[in-house]
Image (cartoon, helix red, strand yellow):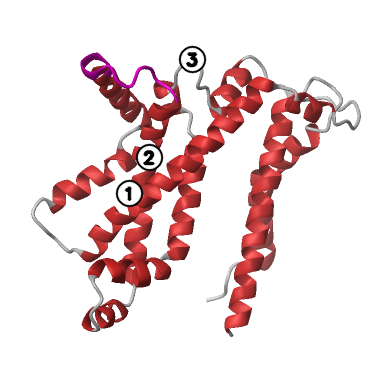
Amino acid sequence: MKGPNKTLRAVVLGLGYFFLYVPILSLMVFSFNESPTVTSWAGFSFRWYHALFNDDALLRAAWLSFRIAAMTATAAVIIGTWAGYVLGRMGRFRGFALYVGMLSAPLVIPEVVLGISLLLMFVELRGSLGWPAENGVFTIWVGHVTLCMAFVAVVIQTRIRDLDRSLEEAALDLGATPITVFFKITLPLIAPALASAWLLSFTLSLDDVVLASFLSGPSSSTLPMEVFSRVRLGLKPEINALATLFILAVGTCVILANRLQWRKESESK
């Protein structure tokens, strides 16, 4: 049986790339547009980048989002690693089904429902304990950790199950404690998965607008919330400039990571 026609495959692949990347490229091109309208070209200019770096509200929202994303990724990896380790190593135990269900709930529950649930929880805590005093960075952070922890647990569980248990068993036979084995053998072996889980959590937190909308306060507007509120009133070219900077930053990180991985694989051969 002959394979699909090469020309047809090239056309389909080209259409796929066109659909995916032409909107992104057009966004980047129009970020250098002199015109305040995003549909007509009036000449090359850095006008909107200058406007972006002088927009205090947008910069504050960006800095807040990066802070929350970094704190979320760190906490989610710490909690999710232990959760994934339990799933991957401890086998079935009493309450295992409940444990898996509670851990997987944020993956399947709509973010709107999760946001409302967390908001009601904080309202009840505020009414009974007087804490937290108001919604803000802490409440957003708790919501993002709740969501991202489940993703981290899935990533770590998969990596833990693929590990060769003989290394851990050999260390235990030589007298190492389970805690020592975990920190000195298991963690180094799953380090790439930890890095992937951290980046995934960082991205999910940085991109979230639903949970942040429910859990934010008057002085804690995140970048996605700020962008969403502005886009509803009409797309401005400075948003194009912001998106272009994000695309360049992410693209640079991906290229560097691929080069480092390729170099490490070449050295290991």
* Amino acid of disc 2: Val
* Amino acid of disc 1: Ile
Q: CA separation, marks 3 and 2?
A: 21 Å
Q: Identify the residue at horizontal 84%, vertical 26% (top origin).
A: 47
Q: Nearer the viewer, residue 188 or 3?
A: 188
Q: Identify the residue at horizontal 46%, vertical 51% (top origin).
A: 198
Q: Which residue is mark 2?
A: 145
Residue 218: x percent and y percent?
Answer: 48, 15
Pointer 1 or 3: first along the chain: 1
Q: Which residue is mark 3?
A: 218
Vertically, is 170 above or below 253? below
Q: Which image quarter holds the C terminus? A: bottom right
Q: Secondary structure at mark 3?
A: loop
Q: Secondary structure at mark 2?
A: helix
Dot 2 and dot 1 residues touching (CB under 8 Å): yes
Q: Which residue is mark 1?
A: 79
Can you see residue 207? no
Q: Identify the residue at horizontal 26%, vertical 46% (top origin).
A: 103
